Image (cartoon, rainbow, N blue to C red):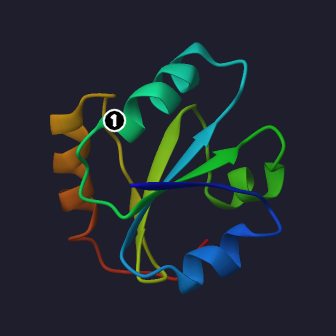
Amino acid sequence: MEQFDLDDGTADRFLLNAAGVSLLVFYSAGCGDCRLARARLPEMNLPVQRICWIDAGANAGLAERYEVFHLPSMFVTRDGVFYGPVQATLNEWDIRRQLALAQTNHPAELP
């Protein structure tokens, strides 16, 4: 699974052009749960092509558009389309289930 660091200037174009499923993860370097997510998510066997990391503190515009209220926050896009939040614990089984559930939502434009 590939990993990318995105920011206010690169996220939209990258996500619009990304084929397959992307898991967006908003994090903060000073957040303990975020450090755990950064270590554990890449090791999980998730049904995504890539994880896109977004530092919420350095990218306030994106964090505001995605309505990020807690960290880490996860969202799913597929083929340039937004499917919404992934509200799960940092357990592989829960994230897999919530990814599948999110993709049953009506697709929308990126926030």
Vertical placement of residue 104 versus 40, above or below:
below
Q: Secondary structure at mark 1?
A: helix
Vertical placement of residue 27 versus 59, above or below:
above
Residue at 81% from the left image edge and 57% from the top image edge: 61
Type of the residue with mark 1: Glu
In the figure, residue 15 lies in which quadrant?
bottom right
Residue 64 x %, y %: 73, 53
In the figure, residue 107 lies in which quadrant?
bottom left
Residue at 37% from the left image edge and 64% from the top image edge: 49
Considering the image in quadrants, where does the N terminus appear?
A: bottom left
Count of numbered circles in the view: 1
Residue at 69% from the left image edge and 61% from the top image edge: 65
Out of 87 and 41, give the one closest to the viewer.
41
Vertical placement of residue 91 versus 98, above or below:
above
Residue 70 vs residue 61: left or right?
left
**Which residue is the site of mark 1?**
43
Residue 18 x %, y %: 50, 79
Vertical placement of residue 7 versus 53, above or below:
below
Residue 57 vs residue 84: left or right?
right
Considering the image in quadrants, where does the C terminus appear?
A: bottom right
Residue 45 vs residue 84: left or right?
left
Residue 63 x %, y %: 70, 50
Residue at 26% from the left image edge and 50% from the top image edge: 46
Residue 71 x %, y %: 57, 31
Around disc 1, counting alpha carbons within 10 Å, would you say few (fewer than 14), some (14 to 19), or many (20 or more)? few
In the figure, residue 102 lies in which quadrant?
bottom left
